Amino acid sequence: MDPDAAPGGGGLGWALADSWTMTRRELSRWARQPVQVVVGLLFPVMLLLMFGYLIGGGRGIDGAYVEFLVPGMLALTMAFGLESTMLAVTQDLNKGVVDRFRSMPMASSAVLVGRSVADMLQSAVSLLVMTGVGYLIGWRWHEGTASFLAALGLLLLFRFAMLWLGIQLAMVAGRPEMVQAVQILVWPIGFLSNAFATPESMPGWLGAVVEWNPMSATATAVRDLFGNPAAAGGSWAAEHAGTLAVLWPVALLALFFPLAVRRFGRLSR
């Protein structure tokens, strides 16, 4: 019997219906925890304003720094903010919620799928907020609608890959109180990147690391699609950022999606 097929269910259609039920369950938490949602939306805005007005930068950038910064901050927003999903997964496992779900005629994969769909919806809202704030402080995109939508697609693809990395780390942590310690492992992806500065402004060895960072690839590709200034580097990674912006998330998903699903299946038995 297919482990994802519920007793009396109809295969894929049944699994999708169960996943949508779990998605609505996760979305209902927004109404119960509005402060957490608002803080999650405002934190990247605060970082954008801080780097844009208080810290500044732009060495090695041919153009306005805000047009370099905003795409980088959009990519950074997609890498961070995973703790709510990680906490939700560990809380469900520790409070026996998953055990109750398993006693029902529902697809076992619906819990993780519902959580990931809710996270992606919140990430889409966060992108809209950040692009709106960026527009208010002077950022503009200079290409057509298709390029704009392609850039948003790359950002959401990166978020989806980071989400499953976060789910796997949450199950490795095992307990809600360990989530904060484990999520520190995600920080190097965000800060060792070209979100705030060009690799050319860094020491040589660090710049090389930054250029091959998955988030740097996404940020550079998004800058190109928006028509915003990017780093002037001539490395292979910089010249093929669009390709890497697809390959890196696909590779992360190929690794962490099956690991997370398999571990979830073992932990929830």
Image (cartoon, rainbow, N blue to C red):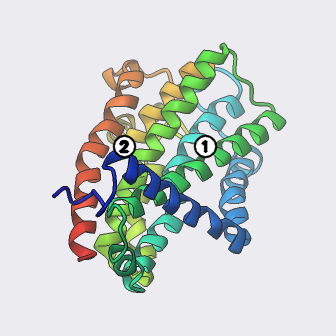
Q: Tell how many labels.
A: 2
Of residues 266 and 129, the one nearer the viewer is 266
Using residue 173 as the reference point, say whether residue 199 is left or right of it: right
Residue 269 lies, with reference to residue 51, above or below; the image says: below
| Image position of 14 with respect to 193: above or below | below
Residue 191 showing in the rendered view = no
Q: Which amino acid does label 1 sit on?
A: Met
Q: In the displayed image of the protein, which residue is found farthest to the top? A: 144
- Which disc number belongs to residue 153? none
Residue 88 visible in the displayed image: yes
Q: Quadrant of the N terminus?
A: bottom left
Element type at mark 1: helix
Q: Residue at x 68, y 32 (%)?
A: 65
Q: Please name the residue shown 72% across and 56% down the image.
A: 46
Estimate the x, y position of residue 15 in percent, counting from the top left: 37, 53
Residue identifier under label 1: 73
Q: In this view, does 192 lie above or below 29?
A: above
Extreme residue in the left direction: 1
Number of the front mark, 1 or 2: 1
- Percent coordinates x, y for residue 124 in the rendering: 62, 44
Q: Mark 2 points at which residue?
A: 206
